[in-house]
Image: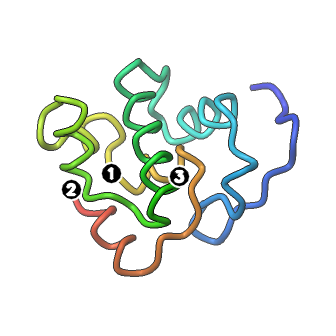
Amino acid sequence: MGELLRNPEFDEYGLLKNPEEWSPELARQLAANAGIGCLTEQHWAFLRSLRNYYRRYHAPPPPHKVCYDLRLPHNCGVELFDTCLAAWRIAGLPDPGEEAKAYLSAD
């Protein structure tokens, strides 16, 4: 895999400390590292939705809301990313807090 153009900083949970350092290339590398492989349009739509919601509310959305908004199956986050926390990581978003990490990790 190619070297990142930047040296983004991650916390102990593998979450990007500064969401402004995120890029699609970084997302591809994080997905590959997570064993997800090639990101499809459904993956990208889910990631965009997470990033847009975070930009507006500074918190993670209920995962089923993202699926509903995208007209995907109720559990699409888990189907696409294994856990919604993995999607949160790949979307380049910072630590959402302990409670949010717990529900994002649930399958």
On screen, residue 2 versus residue 48, left or right, reads right
Residue at left offset 21%, top offset 39%: 67
| Residue type, mark 3 in image | Arg
Q: Give the residue pinned by disc 3.
A: 89
The local crowd at label 1, few if under 14, some if 14 to 19, many if 20 or more residues have their Cα within 10 Å, is some
Foreground residue among 54 and 24: 54
> Which SS class for mark 1?
loop
Q: Quadrant of the N terminus?
A: top right
Q: Where is residue 13, by image quadrant?
A: bottom right
Residue 68 drawn above or below residue 61:
above
| Residue positioned 32% across, 62% down in the render | 104
* For residue 22, side relative to residue 92 (left or right): right
Across and down, in percent, residue 32 comes to 56, 32
**Secondary structure state at the residue bearing disc 2:** loop
Q: Which amino acid does the dot numbered 2 rest on?
A: Asp
Question: At label 1, which amino acid type do we have?
Answer: Thr
Q: Secondary structure at mark 3?
A: helix
Q: Which callout, 1 or 2, points at the residue further toward the start of the chain?
A: 1
The answer to whether residue 86 is above or below residue 79 is below
Report if the CB atoms under discs 1 and 2 are less than 8 Å apart. Answer: yes
Which quadrant would the C terminus be assigned to in this image?
bottom left
Sequence-earlier tag: 3 or 2: 3
Q: Please tell me the numbered disc located at residue 107.
A: 2
Which is nearer the N-term, disc 1 or disc 3?
1
